[in-house]
Image (cartoon, helix red, strand yellow):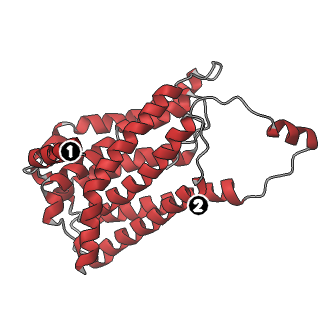
């Protein structure tokens, strides 16, 4: 624990002078081409790789998948440690919704601002999730690639907060997403190690709840805040509503739709122990 406390103290000192409207904007301006390039190349690379692997055996990357999920759990815990207390503080303040209209100072500078900035940047390497699915030749559903692509662009956009007129919703959205990711990537990591953790349905319910809250906050910003660029908030509404639809469709298909009864022979075969490959868990968020 002492090592952890020292690491947190070092981080807080190192990030004390970091500001989203200074260092953050300068970095995003300088490396805009990276995010633009990743966004443009993402789908062509993914579908080209799928075509290349069509008649080839899936790769066995189980050890790397476990390590990758562990890294994402640790990173999202870091984000949650700094974002979570800020959101709780705002909830207790009595003016939580008003803080969605402007950038509170505790989110504009210092450790929370740095965590928000790191969270936005993390959406680029998170696309490695898709590579694991493709290399393991698992089904790649629309929800997965659509979510990865749009959330990366949106996180970059709201991190550009001072120039597009966003407010404290970036911290709220990041805290919610980090909480979901801690649970989700822990489950994925355990599945990659051949465990069977419960809670898949609960994860999807939490994700649906996140989308409802996100859409509500985005609508609130349009109707109650002085939004400098309404397209930014309107984009948030469209994004969250589309996520809700896709997650609801996924939930219905996986947990509620009645499946046709299997013939006796097929049912017996399905009940027999199966040899599993890597990436058993679908990466949907």
Q: Which residue is mark 2?
A: 248
Give the total of numbered labels: 2
Q: Residue at x 15, y 59 (%)?
A: 108
Q: Residue at x 70, y 60 (%)?
A: 256
- Estimate the x, y position of residue 195 in percent, counting from the top left: 59, 39
- The residue furthest top is 56
Q: Residue at x 12, y 47 (%)?
A: 15
Within 10 Å of disc 1 (Cα), the crowding (few <14, some 14-19, many 20+) is few
- Estimate the x, y position of residue 11 in percent, counting from the top left: 15, 45
Based on the displayed image, in which of its 4 quarters is residue 227 positioned? Answer: bottom left
- Viewer-nearest of labels 2 and 1? 1
Within 10 Å of disc 2 (Cα), the crowding (few <14, some 14-19, many 20+) is some
Work out whether residue 85 or residue 143 is closer to the camera in this orientation and state it.
85
Q: Earlier in the sequence, mark 2 or mark 1?
A: 1
Describe the element under mark 2 as helix, strand or loop. helix
Vertical position of residue 57 compared to residue 173: above or below: above
Q: Which residue is mark 1?
A: 2
Q: Which mark is residue 271?
A: none
Work out whether residue 181 or residue 8 is closer to the camera in this orientation and state it.
8
Work out whether residue 169 or residue 156 is closer to the camera in this orientation and state it.
169
CA gap between label 2 and label 1 equals 44 Å
Q: In the rendered image, is residue 95 in sight? A: no
Q: Residue at x 32, y 34 (%)?
A: 37
Horizontal relation, residue 38 to residue 274: left or right: left
Vertical position of residue 228 compared to residue 254: above or below: below
Vertical position of residue 140 compared to residue 8: above or below: above
- Estimate the x, y position of residue 3 in percent, counting from the top left: 21, 41
Work out whether residue 269 or residue 216 is closer to the camera in this orientation and state it.
269
- The residue furthest front is 2
């Amino acid at each position: 624990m002492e090592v952890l406390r020292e690491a947190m103290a070092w981080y807080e000192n190192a990030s004390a002078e970091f500001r989203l409207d200074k260092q953050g904007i300068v970095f995003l301006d300088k490396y805009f081409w990276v995010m633009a390039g990743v966004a443009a190349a993402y789908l062509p690379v993914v579908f080209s790789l799928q075509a290349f692997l069509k008649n080839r055996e899936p790769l066995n990357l189980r050890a790397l998948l476990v390590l990758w999920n562990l890294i994402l759990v640790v990173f999202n815990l870091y984000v949650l440690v700094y974002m979570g207390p800020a959101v709780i503080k705002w909830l207790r303040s009595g003016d939580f919704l008003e803080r969605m209209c402007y950038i509170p100072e505790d989110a504009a500078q210092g450790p929370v601002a740095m965590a928000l900035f790191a969270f936005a940047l993390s959406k680029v390497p998170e696309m490695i999730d898709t590579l694991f699915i493709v290399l393991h030749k698992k089904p790649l559903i629309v929800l997965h690639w659509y979510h990865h692509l749009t959330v990366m662009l949106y996180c970059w956009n709201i991190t550009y907060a001072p120039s597009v007129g966003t407010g404290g919703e970036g911290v709220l959205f990041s805290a919610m997403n980090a909480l979901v990711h801690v649970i989700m990537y822990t489950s994925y990591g355990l599945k990659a190690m051949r465990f069977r953790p419960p809670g898949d349905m609960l994860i999807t319910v939490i994700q649906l709840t996140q989308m409802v809250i996100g859409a509500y906050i985005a609508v609130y910003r349009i109707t109650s805040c002085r939004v400098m660029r309404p397209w930014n908030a309107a984009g948030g509404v469209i994004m969250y509503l589309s996520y809700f639809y896709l997650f609801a469709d996924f939930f219905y298909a996986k947990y509620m739709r009645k499946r046709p009864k299997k013939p006796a022979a097929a049912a017996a075969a399905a009940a027999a122990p199966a040899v599993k490959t890597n990436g058993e868990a679908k990466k949907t968020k």
